[in-house]
Amino acid sequence: MNLIFFGPPGGGKGTQARLLQARRGFVQISTGDILREAIAVGTSLGREAQRYMDKGELVPDVVMIGIVEERLRRPDTAAGFVLDGFPRTLPQAAALEEMLGRLGRRLDRVVDFQVSEATLVRRLSGRRVCQAAGHIYHVEFNPPRQPGVCDIDGSPLYQREDDRPETVRRRMEVYRAQTAPVLEHYRARSVYTVLDAEGAVEEVSTRLEAALGL
């Protein structure tokens, strides 16, 4: 299956995409990851993206679209893929449809992860990251053995600035404003599916697989 996951920060779409990759072989394609990879490998599009980023500018749609197409052309996507973080704009959505047509692929489902603001604040504001290597914990769902200390390397844990409750709420507002036109584009089509993403990871996974007919 070829899927797009939409959802706010902390909505669980990345976690569910990784589970589908492990269990079903659908490759998770995170635009942040493939952008960093293209830059690290030094592809022509990666070098172009780096020029914009070095100037503190957003990577243009045409460059991001090219990087996504490079990734979709790899053989490991034949069993299916999950796009996480793309498309973010209407031009990207239109370009994706053209791209899939060129590749002889189709979009099977667009899944809209819906979570309350209270749940998102709880999930993200409880996250803690170790200073040495970035290991991630949660004060409620995945606490370290010793409060404030990483189990793996013993370094102090800290709360990222963008995980503070007031910042999470601002991120939610930005997400709604940015994705509203793209979601409206898909909402009128039969591929659009709403997913209740509240609850534990396995609960959401069960709902998701049912929604996808798996």
Image: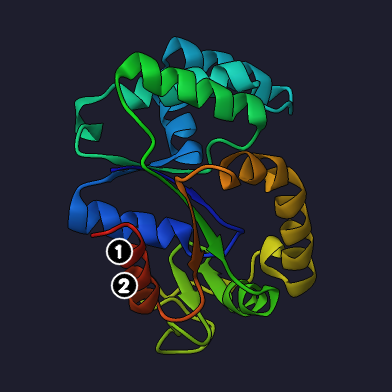
Residue 164 placement (x, y as % from top left): 72, 71
Q: Is residue 63 left or right of residue 132?
A: right
Which of the pair 67/53 is nearer the observer? 67
The type of residue carrying mark 2 is Thr
Q: Secondary structure at mark 2?
A: helix
Q: Vertical placement of 198 versus 49: above or below?
A: below
Disc on res. 206:
2
The type of residue carrying mark 1 is Glu
**Quarter of the rendering occupied by the N terminus:** top left
Q: Residue at x 36, y 41 (%)?
A: 108
**Quarter of the rendering occupied by the C terminus:** bottom left
Residue 54 placement (x, y as % from top left): 67, 24
Task: Check contact, mark 2 vs mark 1: CB within 8 A.
Answer: yes
Residue 103 placement (x, y as % from top left): 32, 18
Which image quadrant is residue 69 in? top left
Q: Vertical placement of 79 versus 129: above or below?
A: above
Q: Is residue 17 left or right of residue 61?
A: left
Residue count near mark 2 (Cα–Cα under 10 Å), binned few <14, some 14–19, many ≥20: few
Q: Secondary structure at mark 1?
A: helix
Q: Is residue 121 left or right of residue 37?
A: right
Disc on res. 52:
none
Which of the pair 195/48 is nearer the observer? 195
Q: Residue at x 71, y 63 (%)?
A: 161
Q: Vertical placement of 199 versus 71: above or below?
A: below
Q: Is residue 60 left or right of residue 192?
A: right
Residue 152, visible in the rendered structure = no
Which image quadrant is residue 11 in? bottom right
Q: Residue at x 54, y 24 (%)?
A: 64
Q: Vertical placement of 82 versus 102: above or below?
A: below
Residue 7 placement (x, y as % from top left): 56, 56
User: Going by the picture, which residue comes out furthest to the top?
Assistant: 44
